[in-house]
Every structure is written in structure tokens, then in C-alpha cells.
Image: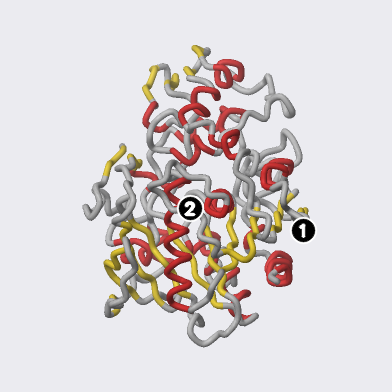
Amino acid sequence: MSSKTEAGQPGAFVQLSAAAKAAVSAPVPAPEDTRATAGLRLIRTVRSACWGKIEYYQDTARPFAVESVLNKSRHETPEIIAAFGSNLPPASTFLLHYGPKWQTNKGKVAVLVHGASDNANRAWATPEILMGKPGTPGMLQALEAKGYRVFAVTFPHKHGNLFYESQYLADSIELARQATGAAKVILIGHSAGGLAARAYVSSFRMNAAWTAYRGDVEQLITLAAPHRGQDFSFRHPEFNYYFMSDELAANAPMSWDKILAYGVWKDTLEFSIYSDNFPMQQQVLYDWTGKYPVKTTSPDYYTTLHGGQGLMSHSLGINSAIMKGGNFINAFKAYPVPADIPVAVIAGNNNKIENVPQSETDGPSDGLVFLESASYINDMISPARTEPIQKIIVHENHVTIAYSPVILKLVTGLIK
């Protein structure tokens, strides 16, 4: 089931997962800050178990459209829901998280950007909470231990438009700079968050109504970002039977818009990548089958990829989904990173992910994104660049690449 929420309208669904209920207690509202930034409205401030505070903002200056969202794409972390005031917040809003030491530390300012189907708490503060290990430290703790002032953004839609996410990030940087007096910040983005960060600094945006790069970033670090996209859902169609359910754990798009289940044909368009419920997933699509062919033993492999009627499914094909996403990855080629921003691209080559029965093995990968995509730097290089972009390969999977001890040491050491 999908829902559309208008700016300021509570989401329609409030069900929480049992695991999330047990993991985090809801915060207590804190007094609102009276600061104001042009075009940004501070709606509320809440205390946090992980952060110094969390602020909930609405961007009233940009023309955000209503985004369609599935019930299974709702936020499930109580603290995040309390901050948003909804588990399906409107597209014009975002959360800004302040590290506990943002006022006492004196080092550089870092802004952290999470990936798809995630939030700043899970990604950076409690990275193993879903595995029952809430005490495992993350990037937040590692950076603060080195004296940095840390901020992070949480996006309203778990699979939202990357152009929107770039705008939330621009807003968050402006607020972090205002709070600290810093002229520039360090950006660290995981997975699709790395693409949102790169889009902002490259001024890759829909039109002039959205914020262009303001010259306020001093370094960019990406972790497992699909710089050349990915095609997981089309090369592994067997996952469609799992993703057809409207459950939190199945929060990813199908590549089939119709499916034969228990002898009955079922319309699954709303759960598919062709619907309006997964704009980010359309944008990160890129056809890698020329380099890494799909397995012919996969169910309806040919019609899944190219579109058409198969024995147990119907698909509109990968090119249809890529075009619906505006051919984002190819269009991104024309927007290099400014030459004066040092860039480090970190990619993983461990394709085994804990609690994931099948990962990406059709080529070297981190279990989801091909190594060649996560380490692809050619599209980022400006003709004026003199300092080479760093490309670092680590033996981490798509999840651990954001928080393993090796990564935390590597990233803190990369900051200039």
C-alpha cells in the first residue's frame, strides 16, 4: 500500500517493528531553538539517546513535490519517528543531528550522509543495532574521539529523489556552518548518500530553483557509493518473490510488475521499480550486463532484463526504469567534482554480508555494488583538477564499510 503525504500532514501509518521498539526509547521534546535561516523553518527540537539533539526542519523555499511512499518504506526507529512527528514525513522536511560534542570539540566540522533505507542513528551512531549489538561504535564516535564536530542528516523518504536529498544536504551544511562558525565542512557519504553528496558539490540539480554548490565543502569521502550505478534487482529476479510483500524487511523494489504466485497472476506494480515509490532506485540504475552477464538459470532472466511476458512474471525492463529515473547515472557524467575539493573514494571487495542469504557474486563486489562502480572516479574528474582522487579498496562489505574498526581508522586518518 502506498501513501502520499503533503507538507505538514502526518503520515497515515504508525505501526512500529517489535525490534525497533525494543532497541530505542522515544526521546523527550526539548525547547525549540529560535534560530532562523532563510527558507528553513525549525519545527521542533528533541533530545536523543545517540546525539546531542535532533532538529526537525522544513524547507519552504524549494518546490518539493509530494512523494509517493509505500507503507513498508516507513521509518521504524522510535527516536526518528518522534523527531519527524510521523513515520512517513513529508518531502519538504529533514532531520539534522548534532553530535554530543558539537559544542565542546574544536576540530573541523563533518557532515554525515546515510544511504537508502537507513537513517543517521543506524548508519553512524548504532551501526549494529539491527544485529542486537547497540553498543558497537560508529563513525560518530570515531570522529568525535578525534576532536571533530559531527553533524548528520536523516532523509524523510527511504528511497527518495536524490536531487531532493542533495537539497536536504545543502540545507544541513548551511545549518551546521551557522551553528559552528565553520567556513567549510567535510562530507562523508555511505552508499547512495555518497551520490547525494557528490551531486551537491557538483551542482547536479533539477533546475535553478534548487541550491547550487556554495563552495562550503573542503573534502569529500564516499563509502561504497555506486558512482556507476547498480542493477541488482534486474540480475537477481528470484528476489522478486521476497520483495512483493508489504513488510519492513522487504523494503526494496521488484523488477517485475506482474507475478505468478500460487497459480494466480498478481499485479505488483506498486511494489516495483517502475512505480513512483522508488525514485532513488530508478536513479541509481545502470545496466552492467555487458560486463557481467546475468545468469541464464535465473527465473525469466531475459524478459526481466529486456521487458515482456515471461513464464512466471511480466517486466517493463531495465531501460524503462532507467528512463523513468531520468537516466541519472549517464547524466551525472557531465558534472565533475570541483577541482579544489580533495576526494577519497572507498570501495569494498567482500561480497559476504551477515544475515543476507544471497549477495552480488556476478563480479567483484561488496555484496551489493560492483567494485568497479563503487571505485569509479572518471566522471568526477574536472579538467582543472591537479590533486588526484584517492581510490582505496578495502576488504569490507556494503554494510561494514561504514563502521568497521579498519574503516573508522582509515577515514579519520584521511581527513586533512
Q: Quadrant of the C terminus?
A: bottom right
Q: Which residue is mark 1?
A: 387
Q: Type of residue at label 1?
A: Glu
* Residue for point 23% across, 55% down: 8
Q: Type of residue at label 2?
A: Ala
* Residue for point 68% across, 42% down: 379
* Residue for point 73% across, 41% down: 372
Closer to the camera, 343 or 359?
Answer: 343
Q: Is residue 351 visible in this depiction of the protein?
A: no
Q: Earlier in the sequence, mark 2 or mark 1?
A: 2
Instruction: Count the marks.
Output: 2
Q: Which residue is mark 2?
A: 212
**Residue 245 higher or lower than 19, as above or below:** above
How many C-alpha atoms fall within 10 Å of the one at disc 2: few (<14), some, or many (≥20)?
Answer: some
> Element at badge 1?
loop
**Residue 112 in the image, given as x and y percentages of width and height:** 54, 64
Q: What kind of colouring is applied to the model shown?
A: secondary structure
> Element at badge 2?
loop
**Residue 1 in the image, given as x and y percentages of width and height:** 31, 37
Closer to the camera, 362 or 248?
Answer: 362
How many C-alpha atoms fall within 10 Å of the one at disc 1: few (<14), some, or many (≥20)?
Answer: few
**Residue 229 in the image, given as x and y percentages of width and height:** 61, 38
Determine the residue located farthest toward the front in the rendered image: 384
